[in-house]
Image: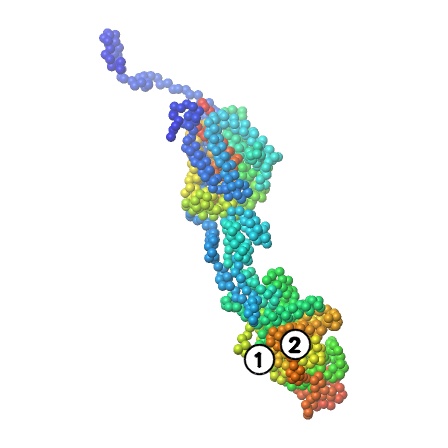
């Protein structure tokens, strides 16, 4: 401001101003004209320079580090994008919460498995709705606590195992319990554990427990049949909700089991099998196998108890098989009831000696052979029948194949092959040794012998009486009539007198066989069987009871044979069940006498006039099988003069070719 | 916003105007996010290990608050104070780390923790921070005092630390400290040949751990064969990300935390991914990247070597921890237990990270040269 004020007149100042005007105006800070440029000397020490150089390096490297981190974070961002939206690993979908009452049905539980009832409508097997408890551990807040609380309601739970399942990786479905009743279901639901849910399930119950346990069979935890009728009828039970009516009669079943169990206990037997069949339909009314088990607890049943001795056990039938031998001899007319057979001495053949239990040492009439159960006599008859007819008969009556019954466990019989079937086999089989079969085989073949000669496929399913069951006629009715009379003699005069039931007419045949153990028969151990038909004048039911390895005691008069052990069981069973069938004891002496006349057959019947019976001097009928050499040598001198004697004895081997043709 | 005037010459006023406010803001965001995650991830873990439901939350929120205060207080300090603290703290934590071998609390087979007044501390977390500072100081001081062989001393220190950590054992911390040590040497201008040698040694160490330590081997195997049953955690974590998708299932709605034992710690990023989805997860990655990259780039203008090395080391430690944690959860690298700064559960690591960030902020404050 001052600069612009006019200066006071000053002569000296004028010159000064003039000089100032002469020089150009110099902006402040710029060097004067002609000024000597001065360089500022900056001293930089060597370490300082080095430090600066380092700093430069460090800065470059900082950029490098920044680039490195940029890469790392970019990789993170890329992977993050990839993991979330580009290629996400989707967690397995959580199961829908089935809190609603309409729960997901199991495919197998959409329809309850059909009931099984006996022939009278008694329930044998029934499926009850239950709940299966399952858990999705992923939904649980505290798995250990959940296990603890579930254990409070279900004390049987294995806590540590369940917790291990809950905590195993990737578990989304764990069964906590398979069959839970409504009350427990409610209590578990009230626990309110997240992730614990229910599925409708069904539990198979067997209200009668041990009754026919092996026959009815069992289902697995998913309701699929795994044994017995449950298995064989699985599809039927699944697809048709109507009750499956069985041939079984639980009353008969229960009585038979009861009597057998008593005998089992009395004689300390290791097991027992028993069957009752309707001889006119082939229906199995009762099938008992002891020891048995509670069908509701199949899982803990031991194999011995699960084993169905009646249909799966294969045993030698013993003397009860002699009925088949006489049947096959009577039917073609080879022998007659008045024929006599040489039982004076044991038959020595190969390594066998065929002896009688109680040798009579004389020529026995045919009824005597059955009544006294003569092995020698049966062997003589079998030799007359011969191998070919014997095998054909046995095959015809179903002894060579599995019994066609509705049990998956039905066993094959043990039968020697045609090549092995020697002359010795012909004889041993005649009295039930050297062949083994299930009790079901034996009784089914006997049914045909007593019912007039019709063979049925045995069945466990109820048969409508309105439509007669088709069977095959396997013999003449006469043969069956005769066999019935022979069976009656067994009970009235023979080995089966303990099979008698007051007021009823029972026919039977004892069958005692030795127990086969590795390579031979076990001494003093046998199976005691009794085969019976009732009422024998007009049979309706066939019975077979067999006790395995019973121990003789005072109750059996010291014997362990079928007549003493098993016949009483059958007799008591008949006495108890006959009234159920409407069969009352015959008390009227006149009626009794009439029936007895009807079925009476003397032990030593006389041939009709003009008929030459077989016997000493005439041991072979026309058409008898070719006698083997050794037997022809043993003929009595009187017999050698008989017309049949000159027949050239031929070896068995030569007849093989014609075996099938006969 | 500035309640503090430029002219305010008080301690706080000077701090506010000189501190790196962007980084401070980013760190605060992480602290807030950590608060959110502890609310979400901890209860199910607490219930599973039998603690009261809110115990972990209360503990962690306490630590978060402490860390926040710690950051501010430490960032008020001068670089000289930082060096002093680092020296003293380094000696103390080194001794404590050694003490863990004798009186350590054994957790999951490793003795890394020590009980101090009822609080479990992992001294090696702090040792790491102090070592970074001490190392930077040694390396930079070497240039000023020709007689001092800082590198040699640093190497000796490093060797001692490695021995201690191997004895604990804590392979992860060992690898982290090793990597940062190498990175600091690299920043210090170490000849690239030597850097390569160091890198090779580092890899050899990794291979050695693979051979020596059973759990290292298992984790590498899990990484290589993610479908094997053992790789359960990794697989579940990836499922969590997939479940989260773009927007996530919503806070608290995730389920990985109910499944994974380490959901609140090593796998917390998977919880983030599941509950908050891609966008927020990217934001988290972005915040970490921002802090690290901004810090490193700002250091380019730094004139002081110590500051550069120390702050660079702290930043790289921070960045590596974050990267390793997130990459583990994403199955980018073999599973390695490393906490996600400010977000994972854990008191020691929270306080150590707070210290780290506080020191970083202290070192990167604008100042006159004379203030060094």
- Outermost residue on the bottom side: it is A610
The chain under label 2 reads A
For numbered disc 1, what is the local secondary structure? strand
Q: Residue at x 59, y 71 (%)?
A: A249
For numbered disc 2, what is the local secondary structure? strand
Q: Residue at x 64, y 62 (%)?
A: A302
The answer, for residue B187, to whether it is visible in the render is no
Q: Nearer the viewer, residue B284 or A152?
A: A152
- Does residue B208 lie above or below A589 as drawn? above
- Does residue A612 lie above or below B336 as drawn? below
> Callout 2: few (<14), some (14-19), or many (20+) C-alpha neighbours within 10 Å?
many
> Callout 1: few (<14), some (14-19), or many (20+) C-alpha neighbours within 10 Å?
some
**Looking at the picture, how far across and down is residue B224, in whole percent?**
52, 47
Label total for image: 2
- B241 to the left or right of A36: right
Q: Nearer the viewer, residue A582 or A565?
A: A582
**Looking at the picture, how far across and down is residue B288, in whole percent?**
44, 37
The disc at residue A277 is none
Pointer 2: what residue? Answer: A532
- Outermost residue on the front side: it is A588
The chain under label 1 reads A
Q: Residue at x 54, y 66 (%)?
A: A115
- Does residue A597 lie above or below A307 as drawn? below
Q: Earlier in the sequence, mark 1 or mark 2?
A: 1
**Looking at the picture, how far across and down is residue A50, in whole percent?**
47, 27
- Outermost residue on the top side: it is A11
Q: Quadrant of the N terminus of chain B?
A: top left
- A28 to the left or right of A283: left
| Badge nearest the viewer, 1 or 2 | 2
**Looking at the picture, how far across and down is residue B364, in whole percent?**
44, 29
The disc at residue A472 is 1
- A493 to the left or right of B9: right
């Amino acid at each position: 401001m001052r600069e612009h004020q006019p200066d006071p007149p000053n002569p000296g100042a004028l010159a000064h101003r003039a000089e100032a005007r002469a020089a150009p105006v110099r902006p402040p800070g710029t060097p004067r004209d002609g000024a000597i440029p001065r360089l500022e000397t900056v001293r930089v020490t060597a370490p300082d320079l080095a430090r600066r150089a380092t700093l430069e390096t460090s800065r470059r490297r900082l950029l490098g580090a920044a680039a490195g981190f940029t890469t790392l974070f970019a990789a993170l961002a890329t992977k993050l994008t990839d993991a979330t939206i580009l290629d996400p690993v989707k967690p397995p979908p959580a199961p829908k919460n089935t809190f609603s009452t309409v729960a997901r049905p199991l495919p197998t539980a959409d329809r309850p498995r059909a009931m099984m009832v006996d022939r009278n409508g008694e329930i044998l097997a029934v499926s009850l709705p239950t709940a299966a408890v399952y858990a999705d551990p992923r939904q649980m807040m505290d798995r250990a606590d959940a296990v603890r609380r579930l254990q409070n309601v279900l004390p049987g739970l294995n806590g540590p195992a369940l917790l291990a399942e809950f905590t195993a990786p990737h578990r989304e479905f764990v069964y906590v319990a398979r069959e839970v009743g409504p009350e427990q279901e409610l209590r578990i639901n009230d626990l309110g554990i997240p992730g614990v849910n229910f599925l409708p399930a069904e539990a198979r119950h067997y209200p009668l427990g041990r009754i026919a346990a092996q026959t009815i069979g069992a289902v697995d935890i998913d309701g699929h049949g795994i044994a017995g009728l449950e298995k064989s009828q699985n599809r039927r039970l699944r697809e048709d909700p109507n009750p499956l009516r069985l041939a079984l009669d639980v009353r008969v079943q229960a009585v038979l089991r009861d009597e057998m169990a008593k005998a089992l206990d009395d004689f300390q037997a290791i097991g027992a099998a028993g069957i009752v069949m309707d001889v006119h339909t082939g229906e199995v009314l009762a099938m008992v196998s002891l020891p048995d088990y509670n069908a509701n607890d199949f899982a803990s049943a031991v194999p011995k108890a699960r084993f169905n001795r009646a249909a799966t056990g294969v045993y030698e039938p013993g003397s009860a098989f002699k009925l088949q031998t006489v049947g096959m001899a009577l039917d073609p007319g080879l022998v007659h009831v008045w024929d006599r057979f040489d039982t004076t001495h044991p038959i020595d053949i190969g390594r066998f000696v065929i002896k009688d239990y109680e040798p009579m040492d004389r020529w026995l009439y045919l009824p005597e052979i059955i009544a006294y159960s003569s092995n020698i006599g049966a062997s003589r008859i079998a030799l007359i029948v011969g191998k070919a007819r014997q095998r054909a008969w046995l095959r015809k009556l179903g002894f060579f194949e599995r019994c066609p019954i509705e049990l998956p466990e039905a066993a094959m019989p043990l039968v020697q092959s045609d090549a092995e079937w020697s002359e010795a086999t012909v004889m041993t089989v005649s009295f039930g040794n050297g062949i083994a079969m299930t009790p079901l085989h034996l009784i089914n073949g006997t049914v045909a012998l007593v019912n007039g000669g019709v063979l049925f496929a045995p069945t466990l399913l109820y048969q409508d009486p309105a439509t007669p069951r088709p069977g095959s006629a396997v013999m003449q009715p006469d043969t069956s009539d005769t066999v019935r009379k022979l069976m009656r003699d067994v009970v009235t005069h023979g080995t089966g007198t303990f099979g008698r039931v007051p007021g009823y007419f029972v026919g039977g045949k004892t069958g005692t066989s030795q127990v086969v153990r590795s390579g031979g028969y076990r001494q003093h151990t046998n199976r005691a069987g009794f085969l019976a038909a009732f009422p024998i004048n007009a049979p309706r039911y066939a019975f077979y009871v067999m006790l395995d390895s019973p121990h003789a005691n005072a109750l059996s008069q010291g014997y362990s044979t079928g007549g003493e052990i098993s016949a009483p069981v059958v007799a008591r069973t008949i006495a108890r069940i006959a009234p159920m069938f409407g069969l009352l004891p015959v008390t009227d002496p006149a009626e009794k006498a009439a029936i007895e006349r009807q079925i009476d057959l003397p032990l030593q019947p006389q041939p009709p006039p003009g008929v030459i019976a077989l016997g000493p001097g005439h041991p072979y009928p026309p058409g008898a099988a070719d006698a083997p050499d050794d037997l022809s040598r043993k003929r009595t001198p009187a017999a050698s003069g008989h017309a049949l004697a000159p027949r050239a004895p031929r070896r068995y081997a030569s007849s093989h070719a014609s075996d099938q043709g006969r | 916003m500035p309640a503090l005037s430029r002219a305010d010459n008080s301690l706080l006023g000077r701090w506010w105007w000189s501190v790196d406010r962007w980084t401070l803001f980013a760190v605060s965001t992480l602290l807030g996010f950590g608060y959110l995650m502890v609310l979400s991830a901890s209860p199910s873990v607490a219930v599973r290990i039998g603690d009261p439901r809110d115990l972990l939350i209360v503990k962690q929120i306490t630590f978060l608050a402490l860390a926040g205060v710690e950051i501010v207080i430490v960032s008020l300090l001068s670089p000289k104070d930082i060096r002093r603290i680092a020296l003293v703290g380094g000696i103390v934590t080194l001794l404590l780390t050694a003490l863990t071998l004798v009186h350590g609390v054994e957790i999951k087979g490793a003795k890394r923790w020590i009980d101090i007044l009822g609080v479990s501390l992992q001294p090696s977390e702090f040792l790491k921070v102090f070592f970074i500072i001490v190392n930077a100081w040694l390396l930079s001081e070497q240039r000023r005092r020709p007689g001092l062989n800082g590198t040699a001393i640093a190497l000796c220190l490093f060797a001692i630390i490695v021995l201690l950590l191997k004895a604990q054992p804590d392979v992860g911390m060992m690898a982290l400290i090793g990597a940062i040590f190498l990175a600091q040497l690299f920043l210090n201008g170490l000849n690239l040949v030597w850097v390569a040698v160091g890198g090779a040694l580092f890899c050899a160490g990794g291979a050695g751990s693979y051979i020596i330590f059973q759990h290292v081997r298992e984790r590498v195997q899990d990484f290589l064969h993610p479908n094997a049953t053992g790789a359960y955690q990794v697989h579940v974590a990836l499922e969590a990300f997939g479940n989260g998708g773009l927007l996530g299932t919503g806070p608290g709605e995730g389920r990985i935390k109910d499944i994974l034992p380490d959901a609140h710690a090593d796998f917390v990023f998977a919880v983030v991914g599941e509950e908050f989805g891609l966008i927020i997860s990217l934001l988290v990655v972005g915040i970490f990247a921002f802090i690290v990259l901004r810090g490193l780039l700002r250091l380019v203008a730094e004139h002081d070597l110590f500051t550069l090395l120390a702050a660079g080391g702290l930043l790289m430690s921070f960045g590596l921890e974050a990267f390793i944690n997130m990459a583990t959860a994403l199955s980018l690298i073999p599973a390695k237990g490393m906490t996600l700064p400010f977000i994972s559960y854990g008191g020691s690591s929270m306080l150590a990270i707070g210290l780290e960030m506080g020191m970083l902020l202290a070192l990167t404050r604008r100042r006159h040269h004379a203030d060094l």
